Image (cartoon, rainbow, N blue to C red):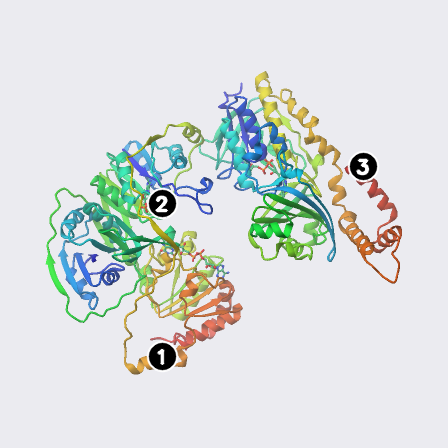
Amino acid sequence: MLALVVVRDGSLPAGGDEVVAECGGRVLLIGSGTAAALDDLRGAVTDARLVEAGAFRPGAWSAGLAVLLADDPVVVLPHSADGRDLAPRLAHALDRPLLAHAMVVGTTTVELIRAGGTELHSVVAPAAFVATLHPGLRGVERTVTTEPNVREQVLPAAIDAIDAEVVATFAADAATLDLAEAPRIVAGGAGLDSADRFEQLAALGAVLGASVGATRVVTDRGWVGHDRQIGTTGVVVDPQLYLAFGISGAVQHTSGLGAPAHVISVNTDAHCPMMQLADLAIVADANATLDALLARLGTLEVAHG
Amino acid sequence: MDDEPDVDVIVVGGGPAGACAALVAARAGLSTVLLERGPFPGSKNMYGGVVYPRILDRLIPNWWETAPIQRWVTRRSTMVLTDTQALTVDYRTEAWGKPPYNGATAYRPDFDHWLAGHAEAAGAQLVCDTTAVGLLRGASGRIVGVRTDRPGGDLRARVVIACDGVNSFLAKEAGLFEHTDAKHYTLGVKETLALPKEVIDERFGVRGREGVDIEMIGCTSGVNGGGFLYTNLDSVAVGVVLKLPKLAAQQLRPEEIIARMKRHPAIAPLIEGADLKEYSAHLIPEAGLAMMPKMTTDGMLVAGDAAALCLAAGIWLEGVNFAMASGMYAGEAVVEAVRNGDVGVEGLAGYQRRLSETFVLKDHRRLRRAPEIVLSDRVQHLYPAMVAGIAERMFQVDNPAPKPRLRTILKQERKRVGIRRRDLARDGLDGLRTFG
Amino acid sequence: MIAACVKWVAGVPEPGDERFAGISAADQAAVELALRHGASMGDDVVVVTAGPPAAERALREALAAGATRAVRVDLPADATSSDVATALAGVVGDAAFVWCGDYSTDRGSGSVPAFLAAERSARQALGAVAVDLADGATISVTRRLDGGRREVSTVSAPAVVSVEGAVARLRRAGLAGVLAARTAPIEVRRPAVVVPDVAAIVHAYRPRARTLPPPHGSTLDRLRELTDAAAAPAHGETVHLDPADAADRILTALRAWSYLT
Ligand SMILES: Cc1cc2nc3c(=O)[nH]c(=O)nc-3n(C[C@H](O)[C@H](O)[C@H](O)COP(=O)(O)OP(=O)(O)OC[C@H]3O[C@@H](n4cnc5c(N)ncnc54)[C@H](O)[C@@H]3O)c2cc1C
Ligand SMILES: Cc1cc2nc3c(=O)[nH]c(=O)nc-3n(C[C@H](O)[C@H](O)[C@H](O)COP(=O)(O)OP(=O)(O)OC[C@H]3O[C@@H](n4cnc5c(N)ncnc54)[C@H](O)[C@@H]3O)c2cc1C
Ligand SMILES: Nc1ncnc2c1ncn2[C@@H]1O[C@H](COP(=O)(O)O)[C@@H](O)[C@H]1O
């Protein structure tokens, strides 16, 4: 098994380290700044191939990669923005099946996330295939103590491939960045009964030094901006503390959650995934609990550090 | 001169009335458009849950083979309740469990969708997600079509059949409806509760596709009205119909009334452990003849609930059969009128004639006083206590005291609940005249 | 020619009940953009689905909204993404632009559009959150990257663009269009036999066990972590509380974990 990771300006995509771990430390890094990205994978890599190829070009790269990967029967990419763009093109160029959006990739079986994250489909792994691994579910061990075996390779030129022309790349905007890097997050889901509840979350957040997050159901309702959405199609976060009010914990949400040290969940359903995930799971009405918390806010002092 | 019509007939509303009207018109070869505001016919429609589809014998032979029926009602009970007592008259028959059947429980999103499917198969053009928002009138004032909420949404026709349900906006706009007073409506509120089929079979003493229809009186927390409980395949429908003025005066919420009814010792064991699947509420035109609009005007007829044809008289709650029949007769009258080239009031007179000659208006005429009687204060609040009291003393063994005479019990119970003999006699006579 | 690809998805709550089936918001957005694009270029718009006869309802809705032509490729529901893309490519082969939704709502992996681009050797711009049709010949697409970053790129023909549902709302079809679409012809193609997707054993979703980095810090710290009463209150605890007690319990935990003093 070989991990294939697209690198942009030396930075790894979401789940880049996890595919490397899933493949036992073997990786081909392609893009710009691959050597720097390799540094970030320290402790997880045994064997690395670096292909400096400039900006992301799924059309052009797939033909060349098919040549470089001809002897690797199983290639795993993260199901990140670039990974999901490149994987089908690569599968097509290699003429192999694509097993997209997996939770576990192995050489005997692959578990695929299906039906909007409510089902797992276990399939027998074909002899050769391309897979994408859903980011944020696996976690990574960094136990490799030896220096990785590094090889630089050149991407064979594609003859007639065409790609989109990148005009600009924007850093996450301030609000988004704020959320992505927030050490503490208070978040609300469909269990909250009105947009006003997010004002309360903000007030609670102000006291706790926490940013406000939300699920897609909430951002779809327009109660808070899309930039507040945590999850695979929103912002990927990695806080220390996560407070979830009325959030069911669908995989698309929780996979964007990183690995908080402390999770508190308030929900009327004791058995939903978010409650399973929580260090403290409180079965209660989230709305009334927020009211009660706000009533106590004036007297609270935050501990920093 | 009126503009050329786009089609022969526009039917507004894909409920039972509209589906039957469109079916008849399309089958006769008229170009027919059936407009429905929901994403599919029946998607938004609710009712108690029992239909009497025999009228379909004339439109869809062997309808029972394909109709999406939950259970065939083979057992019908009427319950008189006080807070702690229940007197039940229970009737069951095998006959209602085989063709041609009698009543059946069905979900409206299934039933209406199925019925409208027959209209479509007959050639009617069903257009969903489309609401009629106004009437088009020709130079003479005659109705020549409808305006819909779609872009370029005017559609012209020789005749419009309004089947847009209770509180019909079209009948009002056409000036046919005079009575829109709250006192003519009752509010229907219903909960659908999920229970496994085996549990329903066991608790209600039925098997296979057999089902139960229970009507109740004296269970509505002092608000004039009645209750019902019907069995579907793996759910039961529990609901109440409530007089609006009294409901407002009592300041009770309908949910509370249902909740109390569900806690009644005679009801609670039937629905124990059931999960709430759905809660819905809808108005019912209840005053019958007293509120019916004029049924026709130049270029338009009104059918079903839009024409207040629902029969809501206490232990009767029949609307779907009246809607299907009136829709069918409206369709027939329109076919006749278009063929004769007269779609004015005169030309459409065949509709009123058909309604008068059949159960549609005959039942309404005969039962015209029924709602008033059944929903009267005495029937609602005093008689249940009296009847239950009589039963209790009849069946109670008070040894060493000997059994009292029925006449004595009757007199004492009448006095206990405070009914004057004169009123009892008069109500008895009224009842006989109406129901007898 | 401009094309839009839509996928008919069996409905919730009753899978297989066509009353509740339909196409995703993203696919509706794709149809809308195809219509706008077609209008701006003065070009025909073809709408394609690979699916069962019931899917023709979605095609008729697109025709009602203004599409020029509709094609259904008769394909079983268990065809692989790449077979679906091959089937679609057979229809939209010479389209200048193909519009798709970013993910289909059932088993979707967002791979059909990329396969389609590969199949046609076309440019791709996937998962657009904003689209600027500009002059129509070269369009500009904003898409998400990881961690909240965005990328703007331009694509010209031949290209496949996939969009999120919020990008555009499908217009409401006019009444005349709806009536005409009811009887409009829909071309049906039957492709060569396709191999069904790999047979799978289906389970309810449950997360995999996470691999965590080994504990760090001094042995003393770790011992303290393990034995410290303050750190003990919660792990994995589920409590039923009324709101006031819930609030107090939360504050107690936050103090125990040193987020509050
Ligand atoms: C391709 C794709 C991408 C997606 N991307 C994302 C994403 O990036 N981010 C994201 O969040 N989602 C995403 N989703 C949607 C995701 O699948 C879920 O639908 C969503 O996360 C659910 O949000 P929720 O928990 O707010 O709502 P629900 O799942 O409806 O849960 C509401 C919860 O509130 C509880 N509740 C109800 N009333 C109360 C009360 N009074 N008090 C307390 N609790 C109460 C309920 O028990 C329930 O657990 C995506 C989906 C798809 C298909
Ligand atoms: C609680 C309750 C219990 C009942 N129980 C029973 C029972 O057990 N048995 C029984 O037989 N009857 C019962 N009824 C009565 C029955 O529901 C009605 O009499 C029957 O549905 C009338 O049919 P209809 O076709 O006239 O109208 P509806 O069924 O109301 O259909 C009207 C249709 O028109 C559509 N529509 C409305 N306005 C427009 C517009 N402007 N443009 C386009 N479309 C429009 C609506 O979406 C709807 O599909 C009950 C009613 C209630 C409220
Ligand atoms: N069977 C299909 N027919 C037509 N278009 C499809 C089909 N499957 C997927 N697509 C298109 O590809 C997009 C992404 O789907 P998927 O790759 O299944 O997540 C959809 O939003 C559609 O635009």
Tag 3 and tag 1, C-beta contact below 8 Å:
no
Circles 1 and 2 in contact, beta carbons < 8 Å: no
Judge: label 2 CB < 8 Å from ligand 3.
yes
Label 1 neighbour load within 10 Å: few <14, some 14-19, many 20+ = few
Residue in the image at 38% along x and 57% along y: C205
Secondary element type, mark 3 = helix
Q: Considering the image in quadrants, where does the C terminus of chain B appear?
A: top right
Q: Residue at x 74, y 36 (%)?
A: B368
Q: Which mark is residue C226?
A: 1
Residues packed near mark 3 inside 10 Å, few (<14), some (14 to 19) or many (20 plus): few
Give B70 or B308, whichever is nearer the viewer. B70
> Same chain for the residues at labels 1 and 2, yes or no?
yes
Q: Quadrant of ligand 1?
A: bottom left
**Left or right of residue C100, residue B389 in this image:** right
Q: Which residue is mark 3?
A: B433
**Marks 1/2: CA–CA distance:** 49 Å
Q: Secondary structure at mark 1?
A: helix
Front label number (3 vs 2): 3
Q: Residue at x 65, y 56 (%)?
A: B268
Residue at mark 3 to residue at mark 1: CA–CA distance = 86 Å
